[in-house]
Amino acid sequence: MSDAPLSPTDPITALLARTPARVLAGRAGPGYRTATWLQLREDHAAARDAVHAELALDRLGPLVEEYRLFAVTTRAASRAEYLTRPDLGRRLDDDARTRVVAECPRGADLQVVIGDGLSATAVHAQVPALLPLLAAEAAARGWRFGRPFAVRHCRVGVLNDVGELLDPAVVVLLIGERPGLATAESLSAYLAYRPRPGHTDADRNLVSNVHARGVPPADAARRVAALAAAVARAGASGVGVKEELPSGVASAPRASPIRTTSDVKRCASARGADATAARQPRYNAAAAPGGTAVIYRITEALSVGRFPPAEWTAPLLARGVTHVVNVSGRSSEVAAGDGAFREVAWFPLDDSRRVPTDTALHVLDELHRMASEPGAHVYVHCGAGCLRGPTTLWLYLIACGADPDDARRDIEERAPDASPGPERMVGPDLILEVQRHGRTHFLPPPCPEVLALVAVPS
Ligand code: B12
């Protein structure tokens, strides 16, 4: 293979965009190229770190308070013992048994347990999005939702102890998967119907590969809830129950989406947005004082842009941002609190398929609530600032009465990387739903700033 960069339309580029696997990496003589070798070592180090990482409840953010999460331990007393004695990781220790019985209600319809498994990193990355979505799915079905708790040094077999102690109908164990070299952030949800000592993997089902480039948390929550309903109906879990996939949901891990040529161009520009903004002053980009954050202001109260690393906190605050809406696939690094943002909310969206109507309306309701607060300036972001963030903002403008084409133009004029509402994410039916929802719930818009477009810089 030559070293010349591949064009965005090259079939090999398209193929590579479909998989995180190390294929077609080229070679230098009989060995890997230096870049491939360094990447491999970096990924291997991340996998090792994940296996050895300890579960830290404080990494789960506001969930801990909201769900009164607590952590117990299995009979494996240390990470080292856990790795060499899987049998001990399948049994709760005596303190854990006492605490679980004392603090969790018996006989829930759905009991969620969080286990570090072989990657606490995966738990830290996925559970903050997944747990509230599961709780919402349970509430929508009228299920009694047990008090969730976390288990350190946990193996899948711990399900049996939980079943014995609490007698829930269905137990869902959210557990870090053995990290591979593609990601260390992949989580599985193992399900069991009325688990009891002696049950084996033949009595369990699972939804695996929950991570940003695999099954996104929103899809995972729907699948887990549907599977929980199926095992409850069947009165059994495991080999006798086959998962029925809701239409439009892939069971296999989803690779990174193939982007169109224009998406590739736009995202290439997003990666260098600071430089792009410097070269193209006509765009409404503002480098905030005290940092390199670049955000694109669309209206007085709404901006879009890229994923903000923690260092962007001060620059974003200096730009007057009060709320952050994260629609990317990974949890936020900026946080709400005293002297920081009023609110940081995460609604992971998938840019490779249609946004489900209920998800879209939920995000729009939340965005509307925040934007309607006095003095609000909401920063809506995804990863690269190309698709999910601009699409969210575009749908909101439509919900507030804007013409879809005008709203798209208004955003694109002010944000160079934005490509709102690609057909694969938004169909005509969603636009109609959003308009209908907006007419009922958002009109007239409470603050003029929400819709007041800022000038297009000349
Ligand atoms: C390691 C592994 C195995 C090992 C497990 C050995 C061990 N003691 O850890 C071996 C090679 C034995 C194995 C076998 C199988 N596996 Co396997 N396995 C994995 C892998 C790579 C990691 C699992 C993990 O990290 N678990 C978390 C840790 C913390 O759990 P643990 O308590 O240490 O180990 C338990 C689980 O790993 C569990 N387990 C492993 N595979 C499976 C499969 C099913 C259906 C169930 C219920 C449980 C289960 O068995 C272990 C003992 O209880 C996943 C890939 C992934 N992305 O998750 C596939 C995966 C879970 N396996 C899968 C499958 C299909 C199987 C087999 C059915 C394959 C077959 N046709 O024989 C068998 C079933 C074996 C069983 N346990 O009943 C699929 C499940 C697909 C699904 N959604 O149902 C996965 C997701 C791979 C994939 N295709 O993407 N597996």
Image (cartoon, rainbow, N blue to C red):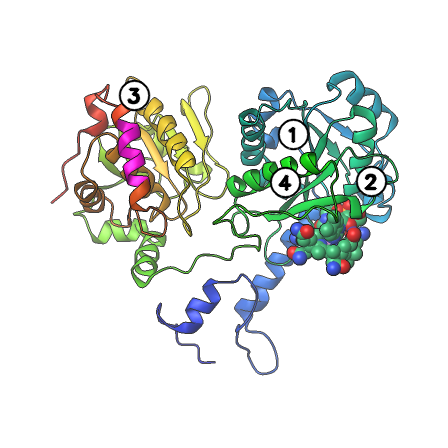
Which numbered disc flags the more N-terminal residue, 3 or 4?
4
Say which amino acid is labelled 2.
Gly
Quadrant of image for the C terminus = top left
Q: Kindly tell me whether residue 288 is visible in this rendering.
A: no
Rounded to the nearest angstrom, the CA distance separating label 1 from label 3 is 33 Å
The residue at the point 34 percent across, 33 percent down is 379
Comes first in the chain, label 2 or label 3? 2
- Which tag, 1 or 4, sits closer to the chain's start? 1
Residue at mark 1 to residue at mark 2: CA–CA distance: 19 Å
Q: Count neighbours of disc 1 (C-alpha within 10 A) and say few if under 14, some if 14 to 19, many if 20 or more.
A: some
- The furthest residue to the left: 458
Q: Which mark is residue 372?
A: 3
The three-letter amino acid code for the residue at tag 4 is: Leu
Magenta-tinted stretch: 430-438
Q: Are marks 1 and 4 in contact (CB under 8 Å)?
A: no
Q: Which amino acid lies under the numbered mark 3 shown in the image of this protein? A: Ser
Instruction: Check disc 2 and report the residue beneath it.
Output: 89
